[in-house]
Amino acid sequence: MPPFEQAVHGYLSHLYGPRACEIQRRLNQHITHFLSLAPFSSTGIDAQSNNAPSWSEKDQWVISYGDSIIDEDLPPLAVLSDFLQARLGERISGVHVLPFFPWSSDDGFSVIHYREVNTDLGDWSHIRELASHYDLMADLVLNHVSRESLWCVDYLSGSLPGRDYFIEVDPSTDVTQVVRPRSSPLLVPISTRRGTRYLWATFSEDQLDLNFENPDVLLEFVGILLFYLEQGTRIVRLDAVAFLWKRLGTSCIHLPETHTVVRLLRAIVDHVAPGTLLITETNVPHQENISYFGLERLPEGEPDEAHMVYQFALPPLLLHTLTRGETHTLQAWLTSLPILPDHCTYLNFTASHDGIGVRPLEGLLPDHERDALLELMHRFGGFVSMRSNPDGSDTPYEINITWFEAMRGTRRGPDPWQIARFICSQAIMLSLQGIPALYIHTLTGTLNDVEGVERSGRLRSINRRRWQRSELDLLLDSPSTPTHDVFHTLNRLLDQRRQEPCFHPNAAQWVLASAPELLAVERGPLADGRRLLALYNVTDTPFALGNSGEAVIQALDRHTWQALDPDNPWNAEGALSPYAVRWLVTYS
């Protein structure tokens, strides 16, 4: 049996036991059909002979809803494509278009039809147009589906296939062990022809969880995945995948079967579309998050789960660092990161369409520091979403605020350093090992959309504004606006980063022990001896380099450094201004 077939058989045997052979035959039909329709040829992200993806310092992505920028005369997806090409061009290599399918709630993550484009946004030709210019990331929303889906209609009428696609649970069942990301009831009453039934709903009463113990559900999503690849998708985001498999009497998160499904999907994309990236979205404590690399199977073999994981601990730790003015917590976490094999990397970000997760701080930041951070975000106009615990209590789950507003000040309150602090946060993210992704509202320095929250009744709407293209263009072209300053400064950083080989995602990363006011990160050395030193003052006062600490002073003295930015020459005798960003390079 060929290695691919053997691996798939092993995964299906783990999931479905003696039914594996029949399920594999049906799965192979999907794969054969895909290959016959559109033999895959890698574009964008390169593929190597061993089917492992490669990437470079030129990989820089944007995250956006299909209608984050609108123009009444054009389909929003066409507006987005034009904006990215006109304003960012080759500075970015990829775009994550958040769910662009027909949906009923959660701004797209309650999918009604997986193989259709929401007509309010455009059609598949607009998606393919975006994919022709950038590496396209699409969401595979596989944990749950909308109550308005045809599968749910089937369930209500007792018809195939949807009749067996959902998870019925007796309402008297003890589900207190189940880990919750929300405070809503886990079991939702549904009126059917057979009477009232209670269905599993991890996220909301409109998002019904799918039953992956039924192999038909798995095969359905394999077909959907292959369809997305046909449309030009090169990066597949597995939304909320940690909750995929359920087993009563357990926490129902990160179960072994869930990891096996990820491994199966990884094997499929590596086989049929080498160069495609699989990324897991698991907003959980750090060690749980990186378990989706599958690193525990080293050194016996290559990691065989996700190519990438979201670096969920980074945003709240950066928020703590820049509002507290101390780097030791961030230094300790960065130092603890495992050395990744060449075929795995992180997706680094500060903000996304969701809030700033609080769970990733578990074990990294004391509760009193977390609570102080939450209180500060309240003062800056933000909100906090909660989740339910097994004992019935609620605890913070995420902060809802735009990143620009989160940078309004420090623990002492608002101050004049908002833009400098904001740019420092983005520069730190851009310089770390991995591929960076900037949310559209980070690029534009968007303010809290409180009116959006009032209209929708959802806290996450605070960071999901829809820009009118004419208004945004005016702000971007007006030198006196924060939007102009933020966007053009970030463009300069993106230009510098994509031309610097030390920012390759696989280049080594070292965190130098330093004074708490300073973050010092070294990247490299590369094969030619080139290395980069990134220095950041995370406080609102000038910082004397002589106080950096022994490791940093030795690094500065050991080499002759020059500034990556030619307009800002390096002076080793000077001081770092508040929230200064210095990227230094050397060959020595």
Image: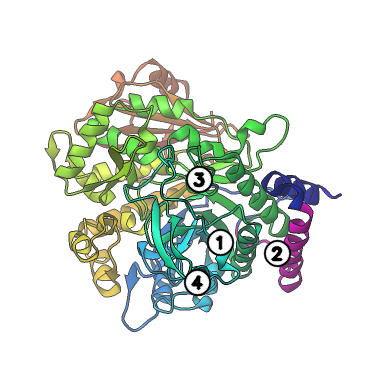
Q: Is residue 28 above or below residue 324?
A: below
Query: Is 42 part of what is drawn in magenta?
Result: yes
Q: Amino acid at mark 4?
A: His
Real-space Cα separation, disc 3 to disc 1, in angstroms: 18 Å
Q: Secondary structure at mark 2?
A: loop
Query: Gap between marks 4 and 1, in whole Å?
Result: 15 Å
Question: Residue sitting at 21 percent across and 56 percent down?
Answer: 448
For numbered disc 4, what is the local secondary structure? loop
Residue 412 horizontal/vertical position (percent): 13, 34
Q: Is residue 145 left or right of residue 407?
A: right
The label nearer to you, 2 versus 3, is 3
Answer few, some or many: residues within 10 Å of disc 3's Cα (few below 14, many 20 plus, some between 14 and 19): many
Q: Please give the residue where the numbered disc 1 appears in the rendered image.
A: 165
Query: Upstream in the sequence, badge 4 or badge 1?
Result: 4
Give the residue at mark 2.
41
Outermost residue to the top:
550
**Mark 1 neighbour class, 10 Å CA radius: few under 14, some 14 to 19, many 20 or more:** many
Name the side, left or right, on which 277 lies relative to 206.
right
Residue under label 4, please give it.
113
